Amino acid sequence: MRSEMLNSILSDLNGSSVDIEASAVLSTDGLIMASMLQAGMDEDRVGAMSAAMLSLGDRTAEELHRGTLEQVLIKGDNGYILMTHAGHEAVVTVLAKPNARLGLIFLDVRRAADNITKLL
């Protein structure tokens, strides 16, 4: 039941922008809870890398006195990866196109993360 609701939230998120290519909800230790990833993407790899990046982001924000980490954004030649906490137990990871309008994606991801937090 919970995984169906998480998948529904991800479906709504992916449908909110043509710039979002994939998304996933994972535990803070990297285990996939729900995903809408592209064919051929390894869920375990996405989960492990997202958890590692968020952990490093948390520590960096703390060590450099930037407050509580809100999100991690990675930009590559082929697009963006955005990771955001969803409460204390989960992380939302989104893959977006290179020309994505990030302001709208940030808003949609924050809403999805809030809904996931309420669910968990």
Image (spheres, rainbow, N blue to C red):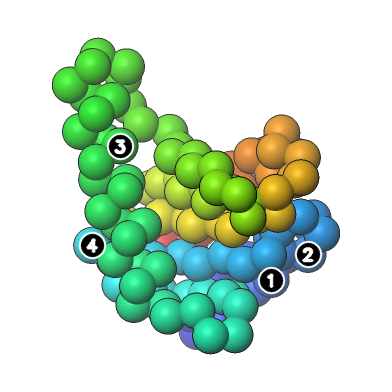
On the image, the x and y values in percent for residue 57 come to 30, 37
Mark 1 or 3: the one toward you: 3
Q: Earlier in the sequence, mark 3 or mark 2?
A: 2
Query: Visible in this render: residue 27?
Result: no
Q: CA distance from mark 3 to mark 4?
A: 14 Å
Q: Earlier in the sequence, mark 3 or mark 4?
A: 4
Q: Which residue is mark 1?
A: 11
On the image, the x and y values in percent for residue 15 come to 78, 64
Height in image: 79 above or below 103? below
Residue ranking furthest to the right: 18
Which residue occupies 31% across, 48% down?
Answer: 53
Task: Give the quarter of the image for residue 14.
Answer: bottom right
Task: Give the quarter of the image for residue 75.
Answer: top right
Q: Which residue is mark 4?
A: 29
Q: Which residue is mark 3?
A: 57
Mark 2 vs 1: CB contact within 8 A:
yes
